[in-house]
Amino acid sequence: MAQNIGTLVGAAIRPISDTMPIASAFAFEINGGHHQVETLSERDTIMSSRRQWGMLCTVYNDASNNATYQLTYEYNNGSTDIMDNANWAVFAGSAGSGSGNWTEPVLSVTMSAPISPFDGERYLVGQSSGASLSGSFASLTNSGYTGYLVGGYIAEYNDNISNWVTTLPSDGMTIRVNDQDNSFYRYEGTYSTGQWYKERVNQVRHLSASSVNGTDYTITTGDFFTYSSEAVYLIQFGTSNSGSSATLNINGLGQKNLKKQNVSGLSDFTPNDINSSNVYNLVYDGTLFRVNQPAGAGDDFTLKYRIVSDERIAVPAYSEYLLYGDLEVNGILDISSTGKVVIINGALNVNGGTVSNSGNIQLVTFATASTAGGLQKYTEVLTPMTMGTTYSIAHNLNTTATIINTWDETTGELIITDAVKTNSNNIDISTTTTLSSVRIVVVG
């Protein structure tokens, strides 16, 4: 084996005692590794014998040049000259190339430097347009950081130099902010013209609420620390509401009122506006939760021939609910004093439900097929109706002037299907979803 050249040492070089402050080697004097210098000029004059590809160098007292850099020939169009200072790239925290986008998290976004920072304390600085930096951050601004007030930079306190070491952002750099739940910031653009953009994580929350009185609802879930106006809450309530008011308390953060949101704005509830069958869309406006009711629920009614248990259909003032055939009420049919329900060739069957202002229900009978010029009706039930399958229905009404309605037998809801009149006595019908039971009504 060839003998090494130089002063050969067979054991580690160590100080005489643990209390001696003299290290085995100074970082700025070693070959490669991690150097620390005050200015960019000192970084650029590191001699060739102390340079290695991939080495790091932190500039800590040079205003807008303060950053940690990595020496990599990949940065400057493939240059292989280790003395080419254009090969110094701002280090973004990845292993090897310095081109990684994720960097260490910061405590918060701030414009004001803390009075007594601890070693390693990190902040995202200067995010607010038009605001002024304060404390020791203000001196950084006076030294050339004014252009970054909108874009922001990262500052980390270093006890060894009693100053802040700053990192300028690069395009795509991403960082978490510890005091902002379920979010992170991504930088877009160059460090002098770019901007940090906040992105939400878990912005849509699927939750289940319970209540013992139909008024005060609670939710207990993990990973939830604050009410946010930037999130959407999809909530299924275990019980129907019992009165005009309701509240929601998530993880003990405090009761917030629930209000119904409709075309007329915010309003109080009517009993059974909320039921256990639907999933409701809630948004927090900073004061209360706004509940958007599903289409066909509450005041936003669609036609149904069966109102199921704990469901409420409301007919608002000066509105009309027009239905052909029987109407079965297992839940609540709430008719305004100036609203109207019209049932054609059918009856009202109240089966355990309730109806308000029943005097506003009008039963109308049209002539049948036995009467010249009268209307005819044909009905058929498909069990099931399979997605993508075309069913041929022979109604034998001997007319192409027909109206075709299809109903989900399980929910009583009017559904959309594709219907083609093949001749005066037949139609072809299909659906884009599979349903367990569908009633088809042809009127002509």
Image (cartoon, helix red, strand yellow):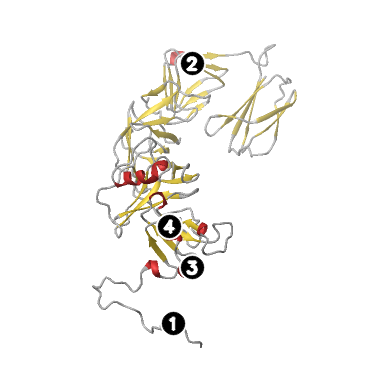
Q: Nearer the viewer, residue 231 or 179?
A: 179
Indicate the position of residue 14 as horizontal and vertical percent values: 31, 78
Work out how far the residue at label 4 is from the one at label 3, CA to CA, in angstroms: 15 Å
Spot the residue most to the left: 19
Q: Nearer the viewer, mark 2 or mark 4?
A: 4
Amino acid, disc 2: Ser
Work out how far the residue at label 2 is from the one at label 3, CA to CA, in angstroms: 86 Å
Work out how far the residue at label 1 is from the one at label 4, CA to CA, in angstroms: 31 Å
Q: Residue at x 38, y 67 (%)?
A: 27
Work out how far the residue at label 2 is from the one at label 4, CA to CA, in angstroms: 79 Å
Q: Is residue 234 visible?
A: no
Amino acid, disc 4: Ser
Residue under numbered circle 2: 319
Disc on the earlier residue, 3 or 1: 1
- Crowding at dot 2, Cα within 10 Å, few <14 / some 14-19 / many 20+, comes out as some
Residue under numbered circle 4: 41
Work out how far the residue at label 3 is from the one at label 1, CA to CA, in angstroms: 18 Å
Residue under numbered circle 1: 6
Indicate the position of residue 316 as horizontal and vertical percent values: 45, 18
